[in-house]
Image (spheres, rainbow, N blue to C red):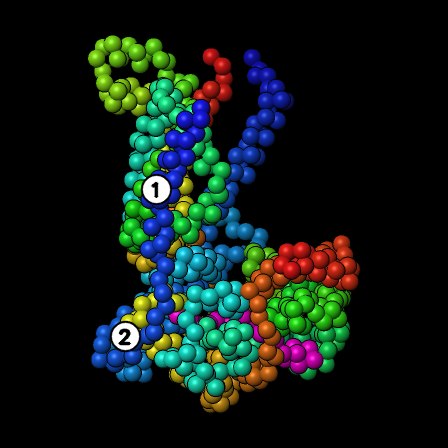
Amino acid sequence: MAIKIKPQKVLSYLFLGLMAFIFAYPFYNVFVLATWPSSQVLSFPPRFFFGAGLMENWQQLFARIPIGKNFYNSLGIALLSTGSVLFFCTMAGYAFAKFEFRFKAQLYAFVIATMAIPGFLNIIPFYKMMVAFKWVNTWLPLIVPGMAGAFGIFLMTQFLENSIPAELLDAARIDGLGEFGILIRIVFPLSKPGLAVLGIVTFVGSWNNFTGPLILLPRIDSTTLPVALSVLNSRVDNNLGALMLGNALTLLPLMLIFLFFSKQIISGLTAGAVKG
Amino acid sequence: MKRNALSFLLVLVLVMALVAPVFATGSKEASAAAAFDPNAKYEVTIGAYGDLEKAYKAVFASADFKAKYPNIKVTFQTSDFGGHHNRLTTVLAAKEQSNDIEALEVGFIAQFVEAGGLMDLNAAPFNGGAISKNIVKFAMANATTAKGNLVAMPVDIAPAVLFYRADLAAKAGVNLDNLKDWDEYIAVMKKLADPAKGIYAIEHPAAVQAIPLNGGKGGWIVNGKPLEPKAKFVSALELVRKVKAANVDGDLGAWSGPWSQAYIDGKVATIVNGAWFGGTLRTWLSPEPGKWRVAYLPGKMMASLGGTYLSIPETVPAARQAAAWEVIKYLTTNPSAQLITFKEIDAFPALTSVYKDPVMDEPVAFYGGQKVRKIFADVALNIPENKVSEYDNVMLAIWNGAVTDVVNGVATPEAAYKTALDKIKATIF
């Protein structure tokens, strides 16, 4: 029996394939350029296949910046930042979603209102506060102030309002579970899709943060990958190959995270999109 | 409801009262520097951008520096060009401690000249004016406020010249060494360009626009009036229009892939840029020796297209200022330091006494044995002084919009000038 191929399906796959290529190509290109010598990184038309300059770029990258330490700093800050945001924002979101208390509406409105303030407006007072706390050149200013960020609280409040039935929480209370126990044993396990979205948004934001570490972590061995890699961006001493290799190494953890958590991320993003 | 609002207000006031002292503790008063003690140990930090760290590390590794300052250890905080100036702007605005020395690119010097936050290097104990008699005058003027405060010392400058490919010029039978004016340059470019072979005479029409305006470094406001005299600014736009109309450019955006590939393939015949661009050509864009030559700009026009200054922020503790000043003095007034910086990254010396050094008269193999440094030095000595202002960057951004309009043919030079003037008046005045 001959298989009947619908033209609409072929067109759909062609379109999807084209879109996938458009979105994936820049990532592929970073890895390709990481293998070409610095003088050929800006070649036109762009390189499509891998070159033979990887070792040269590798040596240049490790000679110019302490990339191992920078990787450790980036990873440490991003993991601690993500962990603390997930914990505190879920806690706050749970309170806003499932409890009634005085000034709840005003407090929630205040939290939401802080999202309307552009980040750069805060930068000078924020920097002065960090200096006053003696937190400059430590990881703390890149972790602590964002632990209970407005976006995370908003996201988790919305997610918990729609995903966890009040009856389930009441049943847990009747069974003798305390509020913290409910949070740990019921709310967190049932919030995996929401946590995955918040986690990846926080991790990526922390991983890519440039201005914060630039100002708050001034030493090359104590700063993060994006700031350290910017040292390689110069006009006379061309380090573009090393820079591209550094970019490729910086991209890897993000790609791995998406690879392992893509199911939860997509599920979290689409939660509530379809009426059940 | 009224009670709720009152409670909320009370909480807000309490929060403000808690936070206010934090801001108050940050600002520090500038204080006089202690005298430099050659026997004491110092660690000086430098905030730098781009290639500066490489050049200065070579200077500090020299036997001369080690002999003069055995007890000074220098460390760096380097980032890319934009990141460095953004960080510096934030730190100075917050009036918090920065690096002991901060580098400033000439495009940013105006912003910091009048905004404050940097030590007056003319004042005691620095007395920068007394040691700067051999530094190019226009660069000193750029770093001096209306009140006569010297906020930074020039360490390198970028005399603007015409780089050209000798092989392409010979093939086209043209001479670019003594172009009498821009019209002759355009006529020569028409002979150089070969669209059939993809040879462009110049990368982009906008590449010439800043030259009649001293590279866009200062001179935007004269006697309190922007874009004056009008004829000077309109003629700069007219020059852009003529280059575009000649159809000799590659429409190449600087530092893009097609741009760099065109240089690598030897398809760009000329470029107007600062002396430092020779380093970019030599190290990676077009490294084969003998291909490029250097000429004066048409009509021997003198202009600057870049430069670096070194400053000491007011928040640097007095005990560290003396050592910071010793390092700045060495980098800016020591001929050996200036030549090492030039050798490492092609940053042309701001110290004029270096121009008499025999090395300046040497033929340079990369330029086919041409004595290009004599040309750089002659231009450097004749760059006119132009008053800078803290609005220069804003005006340059608006002006670039006018240039784009002319390049795209959506406005005549006269109309583009008027639009730019109106925008500047609405934005600044």
Q: For residue A145, which numbered disc appears in the image?
A: 1
The quarter in which the N terminus of chain B is drawn is top left
Residue at left offset 56%, top offset 56%: B257
Q: Indicate the position of residue A62 as horizontal and vertical percent values.
A: 33, 58
Q: Specify the segment rendered in magenta.
A: B293-312
Q: Nearer the viewer's eye, disc 2 or disc 1?
A: 1
Q: Indicate the position of residue B83 as horizontal and vertical percent values.
A: 45, 57
Q: Indicate the position of residue B250 as horizontal and vertical percent values.
A: 67, 61
The quarter in which the C terminus of chain B is drawn is bottom right
Nearest the viewer among B208 and A128 is A128
Mark 1 belongs to which subunit? A
Q: Residues within 10 Å of mark 1 (few under 14, many from 20)?
A: few
Residue B307 highlighted magenta (yes or no): yes
Q: Quadrant of residue B305?
A: bottom right
Residue at left offset 28%, top offset 53%: A134
Find disc 2 in the rendering and name its residue.
Answer: B72
Q: Indicate the position of residue A148 as horizontal and vertical percent values.
A: 35, 35
Residue type, numbered disc 2: Ile
Residue A25 highlighted magenta (yes or no): no
> Does B277 sit left or right of A64 as displayed?
right
Q: Residues within 10 Å of mark 2 (few under 14, many from 20)?
A: many
> Does A124 sit left or right of B167 as displayed?
left
Give the answer, above or below, for where A143 lies relative to B250.
above
Labels 2 and 1 share a subunit: no
Q: Look at the image and tell me whether residue B260 can be seen.
A: yes
> Does A21 sit left or right of A147 as displayed?
right
Residue type, numbered disc 1: Pro
Nearest the viewer among A67 and B98 is B98
Mark 2 belongs to which subunit? B
Asked which secondary structure carries label 1, the reply is: helix
Residue at left offset 29%, top offset 48%: A139
